[in-house]
Image (cartoon, rainbow, N blue to C red):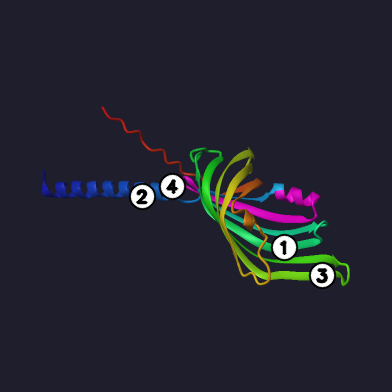
């Protein structure tokens, strides 16, 4: 084989190898690029607050897909008022919270972008709370005392699982069940913290949550589905 022909063949082989590596790298990169974002509301708490003025909680939920995983974010506000006529106590709490985490989507190969997932979340909250007591006294009359925590921070972890299904073009509905663990609160000044927004009662140790979401998906691009080749051995 002439020298020039050998050189040309070598250049052609290198080019084919390079183009093959570039194509494979592009496919691997596209595998981890998000294909869209889902944004929605927690309809359950919104509906509950409509019929219970003592409980006002508004929560926005979103997720974005990365291959087999979903990055999840919840943002919300919560106002809670509880009165005990027997003990003459009135408790008020108001604040905001967020949860962020990652879920593993068992249905990651589903072309409709449905999701059945398990995951881990971390939550944080900033809030204030006040407790007023009114105790009747036979001599001094009503004795009113106030205790408040004007700036409290709370945190916790969540183990979550749930399902999201497309009910119409780009419209999804689904639920999330969560077990909220390792609660903590800091910044108390006059009383122990009773309720943390986004979490529940601190003294419980373990809280359970249920969210029902209505979401709209904004697609970015066509999702790349990576299907592993079967290992065929003789």
Q: Nearer the viewer, residue 193 or 126?
A: 193
In the rendered structure, which disc, 1 or 3, sits on the residue that comes first in sequence?
Answer: 1
Q: Which residues are magenta?
A: 45-69
Would residue 113 be visible to someone looking at this image?
no
Magenta span includes 49: yes
* Left or right: 182 in relation to 88: left
Q: Residue at x 22, y 50 (%)?
A: 11
Q: Nearer the viewer, mark 4 or mark 1?
A: 1
Whichever of callouts 4 and 1 sits on the residue coming sooner in the sequence is: 4
Q: Where is residue 195 drawn, in percent x and y?
A: 67, 59
Residue 144, disc: 3
Which label's residue is closer to the chain start, 4 or 2? 2
- CA gap, disc 1 to disc 3? 19 Å
Per the rendering, the mark at residue 25 is 2
| C-alpha separation, residue under disc 4 versus residue under disc 2 | 10 Å
The label shown at residue 93 is: 1
Instruction: Indicate the position of residue 60 as horizontal and vertical percent values.
Output: 65, 54
146 sits left or right of 60 in the view: right
Q: Which residue is mark 4?
A: 31
Q: In what element is the residue under mark 1?
A: strand
Q: Position of residue 133 (x, y in %)?
A: 79, 65
Residue 146 appears in the rendering: yes
Q: Quadrant of the C terminus?
A: top left
C-alpha gap between disc 2 and disc 1:
52 Å
- In the structure shown, which secondary structural element does the residue marked by tag 3 occupy? strand
């Amino acid at each position: 084989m002439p020298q020039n022909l050998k050189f040309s063949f070598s250049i052609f082989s290198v080019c084919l190898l390079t183009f093959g590596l570039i194509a494979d790298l592009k496919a691997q990169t596209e595998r981890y690029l998000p294909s869209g974002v889902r944004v929605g509301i927690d309809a359950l708490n919104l509906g509950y607050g409509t019929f219970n003025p003592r409980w006002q909680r508004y929560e926005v939920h979103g997720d974005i897909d990365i291959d087999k995983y979903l990055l999840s974010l919840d943002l919300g506000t919560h106002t809670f008022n509880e009165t005990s006529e027997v003990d003459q106590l009135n408790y008020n709490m108001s604040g905001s919270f967020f949860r962020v985490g990652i879920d593993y989507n068992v249905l990651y190969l589903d072309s409709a972008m449905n999701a059945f997932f398990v995951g881990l979340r971390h939550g944080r909250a900033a809030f204030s709370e006040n407790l007023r007591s009114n105790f009747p006294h036979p001599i001094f009359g009503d004795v009113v005392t106030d205790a408040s925590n004007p700036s409290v921070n709370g945190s916790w972890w969540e183990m979550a699982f749930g399902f999201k299904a497309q009910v119409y073009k780009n419209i999804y509905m689904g639920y999330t069940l969560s077990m909220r663990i390792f609660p903590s609160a800091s910044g108390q000044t006059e009383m122990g913290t009773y309720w943390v927004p986004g979490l529940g009662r601190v003294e419980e140790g373990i809280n359970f949550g249920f969210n029902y979401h209505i979401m709209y998906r904004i697609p970015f691009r066509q999702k790349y589905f990576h299907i592993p080749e079967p290992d065929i051995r003789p």
